[in-house]
Image (cartoon, rainbow, N blue to C red):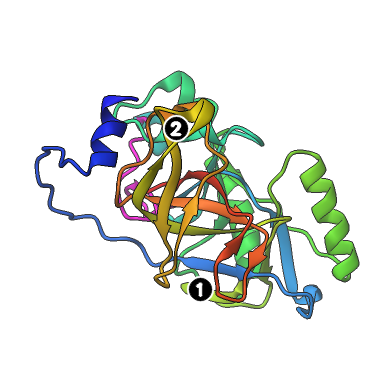
Amino acid sequence: MSGLLRALMLGLALVAPVAVATDVAPDILLANVYRAQIDVTRYLVSEKLDGVRAVWDGKSLRFRSGKPIHAPAWFIAGLPLQALDGELWMGRGRFAQLSGAVRKEIPVDDEWSQVRYMIFELPGASGPFRERADQISQLVRQANVAWLQPVKQFSVADDTSLRQRLAAVVAAGGEGLMLHRADAVYETGRSDTLLKLKPWLDAEAEVIGYRPGKGRHTGSLGALLVRTPEGKTFLLGTGFTDEVRRNPPQKGTWVTYRYRELTNTGLPRFASFLRIRED
């Protein structure tokens, strides 16, 4: 059992300097889950990128928590003065590599040369989303740098067509689809203006405890005890890599998990660890 894991399980306090939080989370639009009765013809659809949400205010690049992203100077220099909202992305199936790159305080050029800033919104811009999507494409053309790209938007005729596109994206290694109301003015907060459609549902919970592993996992993590924003607690015991089992997320960390559906008591069914939430 690693020293960190032993300390965590015994509830020992690790001595660390007290930091005063100064970063303010930006107001951003958050998605609801797609429902079959939605009129898909009113939405523009795009692939849900498995990346890291990043907000640019014209001067600095930040995580959704408000904490700074330490991108190389050349990467920042290529961005316009216009506020942007999008995903840092390396491509399908490369989230772990991307996460490792963008979380470093000292950026590595070779890693960042593989990162694309995929733009899907213009914070505070006027007009309906359909017009803002066109403006995004224009901004990208004007910037003329390889690492700034628009998220491709398309239309579908009905729910059947939408499900066919979802199947094609997932088969190719993608995560799912996003639907954004084409006539929507810019807004923030959680709204049906933005919907996500995935084969699995996902949610976030806070780590509040641990259970030791058994069998081949003896000496490492067996399960995380987590608490949802609604106050529900449950054990999250699958989906971990060997590295995460050896070095589990500390208490207070928020993690993302996937699940099939909710039980009658509001707990996720077939919950599986996906990743530590990016701040």
Is residue 225 shown in magenta? Answer: no
Identify the residue at horizontal 40%, vertical 44% (top origin): 211
Q: Amino acid at mark 1?
A: Arg
Between circles 2 and 1, the one closer to the viewer is 2
Q: Amino acid at mark 2?
A: Arg
Q: Position of residue 195 (x, y in %)?
A: 64, 68
Q: Position of residue 249 (x, y in %)?
A: 36, 41
Mark 2–mark 1 CB contact (< 8 Å): no
Specify whether residue 263 is in view: yes
For marks 2 and 1, the one nearer the N-term is 1
In this view of the protein, which residue sits in the foreground, 156 or 3? 3
Res. 16 image quadrant: top left
Q: Which mark is residue 40?
A: none
Identify the residue at horizontal 56%, vertical 77% (top origin): 185
Drawn side of residue 16 relative to residue 222, left or right: left
Identify the residue at horizontal 79%, vertical 39% (top origin): 172
Q: Is residue 32 above or below residue 98?
A: below
Drawn side of residue 59 relative to residue 78, left or right: left
State which region is magenta: 54-72
- Name the magenta segment's main secondary structure: loop
Is residue 68 shown in magenta? Answer: yes
Q: Which mark is residue 190?
A: 1
Q: CA distance from mark 2 to mark 1?
A: 33 Å
Drawn side of residue 107 relative to residue 276, left or right: left
Q: Secondary structure at mark 1?
A: strand
To which residue does mark 2 refer? 245
Q: Is residue 141 above or below residue 216?
A: below
Q: Secondary structure at mark 2?
A: helix
Q: Outermost residue, top direction? A: 110
Q: Position of residue 156 (x, y in %)?
A: 84, 65
